[in-house]
Amino acid sequence: MTAYDLSRYLNVRSAYGSSFAPDGTLAFLMNTTGVGQIWSLTEPQGWPEQLTFYDDTVSFVGYSPERQELAFGMDEGGNERAQLYRLDADGHIHALTGMPDAKHRWGGWSPDGERFAFASNRRNEAVFDIYVQDRDATGDDAELVWEGDGWLSVGGFSPDGTRLLVSEAHSSFDQDIYVLDLDSEDLTHLTPHEGKVRYTSASWGPDGDAVYLVTDAESDTLELARLSLEGDLDIVRSDDQWNIDGVALDRDSGRLAYSRNVDGYNEITVGELTGPTSIETFPTPDLPGGLAGGVSWGPDAERFAVSVTGRTVNTNVFVVEAATGESKQWTAASTAGIPRETFVEPEVVRFDSFDGREIPALFSLPDGAATGAGTDGNTPVIVDIHGGPESQRRPSFSGLTQYFLSRGYAVFEPNVRGSTGYGKAYTHLDDVEKRLDSVKDLRAGVDWLHNHPAVDPDRIVAMGGSYGGFMVLAALTEYPDLWAAGVDVVGIANFVTFLENTGDWRRELREAEYGSLAEDREFLESISPINNVDRIDAPLFVLHGANDPRVPVGEAEQIAEQAEKQGVPVEKLVFDDEGHGISKRENRIEAYTAVVEFLDEHV
């Protein structure tokens, strides 16, 4: 088999985040230049036209419902202070916000395309307010329509354009839904509740008399529901075992698509509302990969665009005929010349943890790994830990993962307790004082690997990003004998300094998950890897972005410095033009080339 270097794998392209124009033109994001920029197509597999040419990543694109113009967002250097822009049909770009010290979260066009809504923390960095702005106005002309006191976002204008759907997040597992009347300035609370309840993926129903969303208000799993404007909740579709992840509804036609999360893969159902809670189901879309999301309905809702990916399928945009399920791949993001048949599909496995609970994971073996009974395992393993922690490792395409597999590493990706996708109770098993129970799950996963005939138990690496970076550091301090090396990417080393220095707008949400500085400081200090750094034995690679607003770069600096003082081999790499993660392709190549060289030396 031909060997390909790391840069080739990291040059595999992705096309995603699409939006239809009124005339059927498809805009989407594609990272051909190294960062996601806006491109457009008028037919499947046509020659795409590049519409933006920035050095920073464009975060979203959304066509006006009435004009050949679109809105998009972009921050600077990964600082997450997104600004909004309008791109006209003639290619001219207009700055809509122009307040670089504030965050702006897009809330959608009005039905006539004359206005748009957004949430921003420009008044107070710690909270988000709701604004409405004329399409041709600048940031100074935005109308403040509601002053918030928390994490607000906009779910779109009502079909008649007189109201806004507003969501407030108290934590990742607890939200509320409101309706804001723009004329009377009345805010109606639709979801008063006790405890933590998720109300997500909310969108207006066809007549504007109800909202469709997914919620776990009446179940351990997320269900598709109809929420009346009087606050009455009716379940439309449910599953006792798996979450319904989200719903995309075309408010004019009543056509909708929703997805069911089955062990990380998803199944899309397409249909049309024939009553408030009844759906006429259409044939299942014919899509590869096992993962599809980001549905954008086309004009008249005859078809929709969707981003499709899988562990052996790099991300591309497909267009599905709603009534038949027939699909066509519109974009042609390339695999950089690497044959698709060389990519490795993971196996879903489960292992028992310390309390008998079954923990799911994705496990990928490189070609040629000896797996027979009695085999002396010689395959090194990268235990790749997702962030969040309210996230889930799903089998989407990863050039880096495929590169490690091509180099002979196995890849083990556990969804430890606290991960989403397995019901509400599972997500809360790592809350606050139970934080280290998820690290015990890692220990159990390594025990499972030790019993696998292909695995070399002396060459197991912990790698993870963001919260996964904390898990790496915690694994190295709690179970130092298990690891040959650790790779910490934008990870938390000290929960106290992390919470003190993270963005003001994030602190309350993060304290809801980890514990508060006021009440749980002693506990937070006790589980912070920086305070147990003397236990680290394995070589450590620390990777971070200088502009990270979520996990400030000081987390990387303190763990690298303290581990090095303990005599641990440490390499640290910080990029001045990155934020929470390494997004620019040239930086990714430099960063992970260094990681690979580090692992070659120590593993």
Image (tube, rainbow, N blue to C red):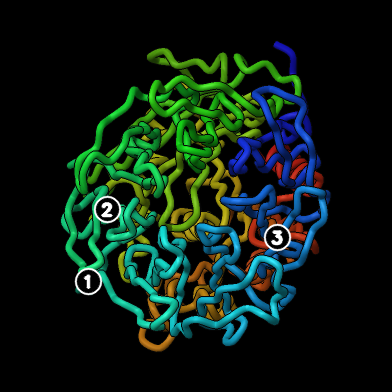
Mark 2 touches mark 3? (CB < 8 Å): no
Q: Nearer the viewer, residue 258 or 162?
A: 162
Task: Find residue 375 and report its horizontal and vertical position in percent.
Answer: 45, 16
Q: Nearer the viewer, residue 503 or 218?
A: 218
Q: Is 399 situated left or right of 5 in this image?
A: left
* Residue under numbered circle 2: 426
Q: Is residue 170 visible?
A: yes
What's the residue type where badge 2 is placed? Tyr
Q: Nearer the viewer, residue 591 or 298?
A: 298
Which residue shows up at 17% across the image and 42% down it?
A: 240
Which residue shows up at 67% across the image and 52% down it?
A: 70
What's the residue type where badge 1 is placed? Gly
Label 1 vs label 2, nearer the camera = 1
Residue 195, numbered label: 1
Q: Earlier in the sequence, mark 1 or mark 2?
A: 1
Which residue shows up at 27% across the image and 53% down it?
A: 426
Q: Is 157 situated left or right of 259 in this image?
A: right
Question: Residue 11, relative to residue 67: is it above or below?
Answer: above
Which residue shows up at 28% across the image and 41% down it?
A: 273
Picture quarter containing residue 248? top left
Residue 74, numbered label: 3
Helix, strand or loop under label 3: strand
Label 3 crowd (10 A; few <14 / some 14-19 / many >=20): many
Helix, strand or loop under label 1: loop
Picture quarter containing residue 565? bottom right
Residue 177, numbered label: none
Q: Earlier in the sequence, mark 2 or mark 3?
A: 3
Q: Is residue 548 visible?
A: no
Viewport quadrant of the C terminus: top right
